[in-house]
Amino acid sequence: MTSSSRSGDREAAVRLEDVAQAAGVSLATVDRVLNNRPGVREKTIQKVRDAVEQLAYRPDPAAARLARPRAWRLMFLLPEGGNSFVELLRTEVQALGPWLQEQRARAELRTTDAFSPVAAAAAILALKGQCDALVLMVQEHPLVRAAIEELVAAGICVVTLVSDVQARGRSHFVGIDNVAAGRTAANLLGGFCGQRSGPVGVVMGSRSLRDHADRLFGFRQVMEVEHPRLDLLTPLVGHDESARTEQLVADLLRQHPDLVGLYSIGAGNRGIHAALQSAGAAGRVIWVCHELTSHARRALLEGAAHAVINQDAAHEVRSACRVALAQLSRERLLFEQERIRIEIYLKDNLP
Amino acid sequence: MTSSSRSGDREAAVRLEDVAQAAGVSLATVDRVLNNRPGVREKTIQKVRDAVEQLAYRPDPAAARLARPRAWRLMFLLPEGGNSFVELLRTEVQALGPWLQEQRARAELRTTDAFSPVAAAAAILALKGQCDALVLMVQEHPLVRAAIEELVAAGICVVTLVSDVQARGRSHFVGIDNVAAGRTAANLLGGFCGQRSGPVGVVMGSRSLRDHADRLFGFRQVMEVEHPRLDLLTPLVGHDESARTEQLVADLLRQHPDLVGLYSIGAGNRGIHAALQSAGAAGRVIWVCHELTSHARRALLEGAAHAVINQDAAHEVRSACRVALAQLSRERLLFEQERIRIEIYLKDNLP
DNA sequence: CTGAAAGCGCTAACAC
DNA sequence: GTGTTAGCGCTTTCAG
């Protein structure tokens, strides 16, 4: 070892003090530079930056966590009311409490009318100064985007969840590629229909929800090219409500007694299941849907649903927390590990 | 707050000192009890245990990591030579280096002839005193089991990977439910075959590998009940080698030009792909295989493979490390999060 | 058998 | 602008 005054045979990891020594300044100054705090001369900043670079310094997260006097405040902004999937997210945020506490962090939940951009934007702005990081699931809209950018400017780390919003400064999107999810649905539905030909129905929540539109787009792409035998009907819009979707699917089955497949893009699967059962079409119609809620799980086990495409709510919430915390404490993050997968469930690989 | 002399408004978390105070002993004694170290009177142990219980004490992992002078030594014992899947595991162990260092741990890799229980058992025994935890992927055998039990008795934490070994004291199995994986394969293969009927081939590595046998069992179960139209042929044994499986499948296709489906349970998919292509059967024969290696990925993208069932090697290695570290430092662990999923990949949901 | 005390690497209040 | 210093909660000598 060269000039280090370190004790013992411990693995040589570069410490803040090594950086300070190399830069010829004190611990506090290095800390200020690393945390972008004011009160350091430009020249000194450069010296420190160089030393950090030179020594390939990485802060020790354990030490940082231990020394931090206050916990990070993570805020989750989710759609209010909400279907079972949103409910899962909410549960998961709560379940993460103990883990977050060990990380010197804590999460709070807020809800907003996700379908009203005005309400959502107001809710976002109200969070300024209320938290260190914000994780949100809202519909994309210029107002929302502006609100996000304002928070980012105020130094808050913003992460989008499930449905992305393209705002400058937004630090990460935690969710799946919905076009690919739609394509996957088509692979499954088309594959399971085999040689059969005939009409295939589609039920979605709304045409203006980004994720639903993307799924439909991907689904169409593959169906047209790879399963031309199957005839895609006009998508039905059910507002993610079971009562509504049940009615729609009941009508659909009446109009098309020869229906071969059904792709439900959004929520309301309980209604669809009921409609299929009443019409005696459960199992015969190849039905693919999204999100492994308790209803979808039951439908799968009973043989009514043939496949469920899922995004793991628990994983998404944890990932959002990890991303936010890593950002806040400038820790290393394996982005590879944070990609949310498009999961496929059949009745035998249920988790 | 009652009698605590704690400073400030920090979240009240129970500390070692609170336990010491409650038990009327010193920090060092509590530490000795918690780490099962000798030199404490039975009566004192009881007092401490009670206090821990009473206060619901959980150690702060950040503080523990910071204070520990030496790094935990994790040892991985994997099959030597090995196919692409084992290669993935190996790569992942290496990739985890920096993360492990932050956790005050480090991993080493050893290989052994996993097909020879004698060699494996010897390799295991040689590791006594060489590490704090051992993660191993070996074939089950009484000799192996005995070796594991000896290590456990010596205070080493043992975790099994991919293929379980039922040894007393083994602290966790990281891997999938292979019976369920076989059932899932049957769901996919049978589903994609649709109305068709005819022979279905099976290729496995060996009849005496636990995971292969389990997959076959699950596959049979579902095929017999749900796809009686399809005729399961006698499994071919290809020793997980591409050259061998290529030959076998080529012969199979010659004998059964009307082959409808093919399930490959183990490795050697490169050979199967080649055989299907030469026979002009790629795409026509519904082919389902395991493990998303680069070959399987290519087969999927080209349309030769219809589905790949996967266990995420990276996740498995990380999970094994987390489980071992949690055990070693008596940390809380979300077992829910450690369950390895049976993943299904089609060409559009590739990660 | 038990206790006191010195750190681990970092943060942040408080000096200068 | 910059430096000094007192902890964060735990582990681990080293004394008794």
Image (spheres, coloured by chain):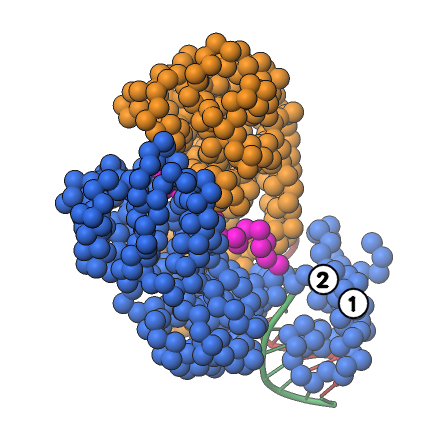
Chain colours: A orange, B blue, C red, D green
Q: Name the residue nearer the viewer: A133 or B222.
A: B222
Percent x, y of residue A207: 46, 15
Q: Which residue is mark 2?
A: B57
| Highlighted range, magenta | B332-346
Q: Residues within 10 Å of mark 1 (few under 14, many from 20)?
A: many
Depicted B184 relative to depicted B99: above or below: above
The answer to whether residue A308 is seen in the rendering is: yes
Q: Image quadrant for the C terminus of chain B?
A: top left
- Residue found farthest to the right: B2
The answer to whether residue A9 is seen in the rendering is: no
Depicted A226 relative to depicted B312: above or below: above
Q: Chain of mark 2?
A: B
Q: Is residue B27 left or right of residue B159?
A: right
Q: Is residue B5 left or right of residue B162?
A: right
Residue at left offset 47%, top offset 77%? B142
Residue at left offset 69%, top offset 85%? B39
> Is residue B345 covered in magenta?
yes
Q: Is residue A180 left or right of residue A272?
A: left
Mark found first going from the N terminus, 1 or 2: 1
Q: Name the residue nearer the viewer: A198 or A270.
A: A198
Q: Secondary structure at mark 1?
A: helix
In the rendered image, which quarter is residue A321 located in? top right
Depicted A110 relative to depicted A65: above or below: above
Q: Amino acid at mark 2?
A: Tyr
Depicted D5 relative to depicted A72: above or below: below
Real-space CA distance between mark 1 and mark 2, rounded to the nearest whole angstrom: 8 Å
Please say if the residues under marks 1 and 2 sit with CB atoms less than 8 Å apart.
yes
Q: Amino acid at mark 1?
A: Ala
Q: Image quadrant for the N terminus of chain B?
A: bottom right
Q: Is residue B56 left or right of residue B202?
A: right
Q: Which residue is mark 1?
A: B51
Q: Are marks 1 and 2 on the same chain?
A: yes
